Every structure is written in structure tokens, then in C-alpha cells.
Image (cartoon, helix red, strand yellow):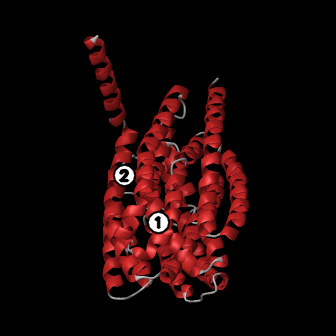
Amino acid sequence: MSDKRGMTIAAIAQQIKNHLSSPFVRNVGWLTGAEFLNRITRLVTTITLTRLLNTYEYGLIAVVFTTIEFANVFTLRGGIGGKIIQVAEAELETYANSAYWLNWVICAGVFLLQCIAAFPVGWFFRDSSVIPAIWVVSLVYLIMPLFMVQGSLLQRENRMKVIAIVNVLASVFGNTLTIVLALRGLGIWAVVLPYVVSHFIWLAIYLREHPWRPKSRFTVTHAGDILRFAKNILGAELLDRFRANLDYLLIGRFLGIDALGLYYFAFNAGLGISLNIMGSFWYSLLPHLCSARDNLQHLKQKYFSSLKSMLLILTPIALLQTVLAPIYVPLVFGETWIPAIPILMLVCLSAIPRPLGLAASQLLFTIDRGEVDLYWQILFTTVFAALLLIAVQWGIVATAFAVLLVHAIALPLYSAWVSRYAFKHVAGSLD
């Protein structure tokens, strides 16, 4: 009996060892470790800001970064980078050159559009003081094209260690500068200026770590193919960003900047860790799945193993944050933020089903069925928007509960359907 028990323990230990030694888990480990260090510096930064800024200033920060969240989607970063990851090795160089120049065209356009959009944003939130801040954060779009292709190539090559290192360095530099500027009384500029300057860290390290440089003059030879691939990702990401920021828009418009500041704090303090970890999985998951797209059994194994890893990491973190929120919020951030506790607890719980949607979307893009994910995003966003429009009438806690409810019901259903659809599609294409 003891021998059988010993064999069982040994088998379990071997399974754990095999699971932890997989390339996907190692890559996620690098990125998650980087995010852990990031969270330490961000925690110090958040504590500093909550002690020095009021809810109104927090609301202004929310407006500025909600604007840039939307603008980031139109850079097509995920779609262009995804195509570089997916394309065959023989075509990589020509696609990379086309992507480089396409990035410049798109990012320059986004820079101009965001500068113009600053005026209606100020009108929408009834506060023109956000306009110059939006202009300044727009400068990042004139920096990004210089290193975006190198970042995608590093991701394609599964060099997540480099990405993890630059994440840490840029975050530590940006957060440290934010603390210094906040202590000197710069208000929202203590957040805006470091955001722009920290992009030079990405630029310097990516150019140093990857030798690729544009080999031709202006060319958009493969622009059509890249944009066809990117359009579904653009649609999905735009709808995702719209959902992620819709509650901010509604609260800021109907309940005021002070209420938005309270809500924005709760989301960043509660959901920030989980979203950063999911970002680590996002970087690693597409190249991980693409490496097995022509082998149904390997694709299934990689998909379900990756999904299990995400849930095993995120679920305990979300539950722990929820339980401890009434203790650590007043202790760490101050009594000013006590009203945000119920909001924070609800959004922490909403993190648990989110990996299901992320993994399902990446699986569809792996098998070139991004349009299916786009249709889902349209449906999901419509339901989400309708529910929030109702919930915001009852205040910010009701809005947070609506966010939890729609994620808890919709994402598990979508995940289950996609896994059946995607693997059936792959099996049919291989017959």
C-alpha cells in the first residue's frame, strides 16, 4: 500500500515537474516575475499618489489614460505584431520591413488624431484641463515605431526574458520618476511625464537586444495582407478596450470626476495585479499555440495546459485580494479610499473568469478564425454596455457588480463553445 502511495506521489511530482519545465510556463514565469517586481514599485507609487492626490486628480488621470487606451488599439500593435509572429520564416524579412513602415504611417496618424480628439474629450468630461496632458502622452506614438518590430521578433523567438527585463526596467524607472515628481507637487503631470519618458527604455533595450533593422526604403509590399490579418484583431481589441473603459466613461459623465477617481482607484488597486499577469500570458500564448497549429493533439495539450496555468495562478490571487481588501485598503492607502472597498472586492472577483476569454480569443487567432472572435466581441460588448447603462443609475457599486456578473456568466460559456468549435475546425482542415 505504501509503495502504491509512493508511486502516486512520484507520478504527481513528475507531472508537476514536466508542467513547470514547459517553454510556455518558463516564458510566463519570466514575465510574471517581472510583473511581480513591477507591482512592488507600483504599490509604492500608488501609496504615494493616494496620499498626495485627491479623488478629483485621480479622476483626471483616469480620463487621460482612458483616452490613450483607446488610441493604443488603433496602432494595430497586436495585429501587426501577431502577423510577424505567425508568418513563415521564408517571408519574415519582407513582412518585417512592410510592418516597420506601416507602423510609422499608422502611429503618426494616431498621434494627430489623439491631439485633435483631446478637445471633444475635454467637452465630454466637462474639464478642459485634460487637453494638454493628452497632447503630451500622444508623443509616445512618435517613439513606438522605432522598436515595435524588434519587440514582435523577440516575442516570435520566445525571448520572453528580454521582454521581462525591459518591463521591469521601464516600470521601475517610470514609477520612481512618478514618486519624485509627485513629491514635488506636480499633480497629474507626475504620472503623464514618466509614461512618455519610460518608452525610451523600451527603445534602447529592444534595439540593443535584437539586430533587426529596416533593410529597405519605404515599402508597404505586404501591407494588405498584414491589415487583413490585423482587422479582426483591431475589431476585437477595440471592443475589448471599449468594454474595459465603458464604466469609466459612464461614471465620469453621469456621476462626476470625483466618483470616477474613486472607481479608477478601486480598479487599479484591485484588478491591476491580475491584468498584468494576464498580459504576461497574452505575450506568451499566441506563439506557444502557433507552434502546434498543425498538430491537433499538441494544440489541445498546449491550450488546456496554458488555460489551467492561468487559472491556477490568478484565482488564488483574486480571492486573497477580495478577502483582505477591508484590511489593507485603509492601512496602506489611507481612510480616504475606504468607500472604494466594496468596488475593489467586486472587481477582484471579476478577474477570475477573464483568462477564459483571453485563451479562447488567442486560440481562434491561432487557427486564423479571428472573425469569429470579432463577432463574439460585438455581442459581448452590446450586452455589457446595456447592463452598465442600467447599473450606473444606481451608483458605482452597482456598476462594479454588473461588471462581475457579465464576466462570470458570459466568459465560461464562450470558452466552452470556442474549445469545441476550434478543435473541430482544426480536425476538419487536417483530414
Residue at point 53% right, 81% down? 134
Residue 221 visible somewhere in the drawing: no
- The amino acid sitting under disc 2 is Thr
Residue at point 60% right, 69% down? 396
Label 2, secondary structure: give it.
Answer: helix
Percent of width and height locating residue 294:
54, 31
Read off the residue under disc 1. 268
Q: Quadrant of the N terminus?
A: top left
Percent of width and height locating residue 341:
48, 65
Residue at point 57% right, 55% down? 79
Percent of width and height locating residue 97:
50, 58
Closer to us: 93 or 103: 103
Residue at point 36% right, 51% down? 32
Percent of width and height locating residue 149:
46, 59
Query: Residue 363 appears in which quarter of the rendering?
Result: top right
Q: Is residue 207 above or below residue 183?
A: above
User: Residue 39 vs residue 284: left or right?
Assistant: left
Foreground mark, 2 or 1?
1
User: Residue 256 vs residue 93: left or right?
Assistant: right
Q: Quadrant of the C terminus?
A: top right
Read off the residue under disc 2. 32
Distance from disc 2 to disc 1, alpha carbons, whole Å, reads: 17 Å
Q: Are marks 2 and 1 in contact (CB under 8 Å)?
A: no
Q: Earlier in the sequence, mark 2 or mark 1?
A: 2
